[in-house]
Image: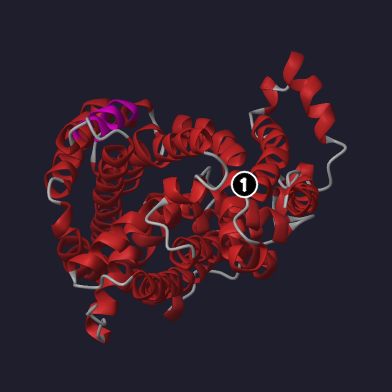
Amino acid sequence: MTHRLNRRELFFIGAMLFGLFFGAGNLIFPVFVGQEAGTALGPALLGFLVSGVGLPLLGVAAIGLTKSEGVFELAQKVSRPYAYAFTVLLYLCIGPAFALPRLASISYEVGLAPFVAAPHQTVSLLGYSLAFFALAWWFARKPSQIMVWVGKVLTPAFLVALGILLVAVLVHPLGSGQAANGAYRAQPLLTGFTAGYSTMDALAALAFGIIVVDALRDLGVTEPATIAKDTIRAGALAVGMMGVLYALLALLGRNAVGPFARAANGGPILANVAHAYFGTFGNGLLAVIVILACLKTAIGLITAFGDTFKTLFPRLPYQGLILVATVVPLVFANVGLDRLLAVSVPVLYAIYPLAITLILLGLLSPWLGESHWLFGTVTAFTAVPALLDGLNALPTSLHTGWVAQLLQLGDWLPGFAYGLGWTVPALVGLVVGLIAHHLSR
């Protein structure tokens, strides 16, 4: 007979999932949204919450409702070759290529860089990233212990440290914000929505599904229907916590404009605000916050990378895979935060629509079915405009030659200017897929 989770066990599963989600981007991106949105924070935050909280919840729910163990099983509903390609690309994005190196870069630049003299920054970053990834690798060696370390130790410590800063933000606001800046002036809702892509949480929801399922099984939950239900319950708890923190961090960013100049990303904003409230202690507190946030997510990403690639390629050893997932981002982390963000954003704009449509099709499968015609057609109609969205997110200095010619095609797509050019083609693909499915029957 399958075990039924009590409230305490459900809380620790939810806290573990929250801890896996809430990493580097979750700290700095809502702060930056708050700075740029200013007095238009309401609609901008709503858009950010839809993509930064709503989509991850839907992703966890899709894994649960389809009784899939992870993204590979869900993507197989398109085709097996596509499942391999999409899963590998997704895990490279949220693993060694972008998310993992970003965790080390952000935690160093926000937390420790203020304490290091300028001539020693490069060597210090290398030493810190070595220690950071060595520690993450050490915890990831035993996947069965991830709920203990992430859910019961690191996440509560992180919440206490962050809570101290956010209480100060609420009790003594530094300012009330200024007018919206950039794209937030014209379309704060849509700009906030696409800003949520940068958290990578919709991708992470698909990736962390296997960790949640394994944790539930370790607790004795074995029946697929119960696993599905508990996965959704834990996901709701995790994203609820994320939503509250996103709102408070965005408020922090909005109130910082005026007392401080605008910054290129959320890291300097956090550093300025922490120092304004607590002086040198604030810098130390922020270091603890970002290191804990990034370390627990790094443990989860390395574990998920090893688990999934071991499933995809059974001959590869888990310990060897997590070593690769540790060494590669160690190298990339020393490139610099701004360069990493510049490269990662276009890739996210290209892959996010494919993840969103896969999640939505999984959620709607009880009503629409799981036909390969349906999944394949929607994916095919989404892929080309998603690629155009990715090209459009490149720095404008690269919008020349063949890139400029392709981008002219995007001008025909509604919402293309805001990174949403894929939405109408995806709906067309849905209609075509349903028709093809019924004709094939």
Residue at 23% x, 83% y: name it. 8
Would you say residue 324 sits in the magenta stretch? yes
Residue receiving disc 1: 372
Q: Residue at x 14, y 44 (%)?
A: 135
> Magenta: predominant secondary structure element?
helix
* Residue 89 left/right relative to 380: left
Q: Which of 189 and 374 is in front in this view?
A: 374
Is residue 269 shown to the viewer in this render? no
Few, some or many residues within 10 Å of mark 1 (<14, 14–19, 20+) = some
> Residue 183: x, y in percent?
73, 49
Where is the N terminus found, in terms of image quarters? bottom left
> In what element is the residue under mark 1?
helix
Q: Residue 33 placed where, x, y %?
A: 58, 56
Horizontal and vertical percent position of residue 391: 67, 29
Residue range of the region highlighted in magenta in the rendering: 323-332
Above or below, 176 relative to 29: below
Residue located 41% across and 60% down the image: 273
> Which residue is situated farthest in the top direction here?
401
Q: What residue type is labelled 1?
A: His
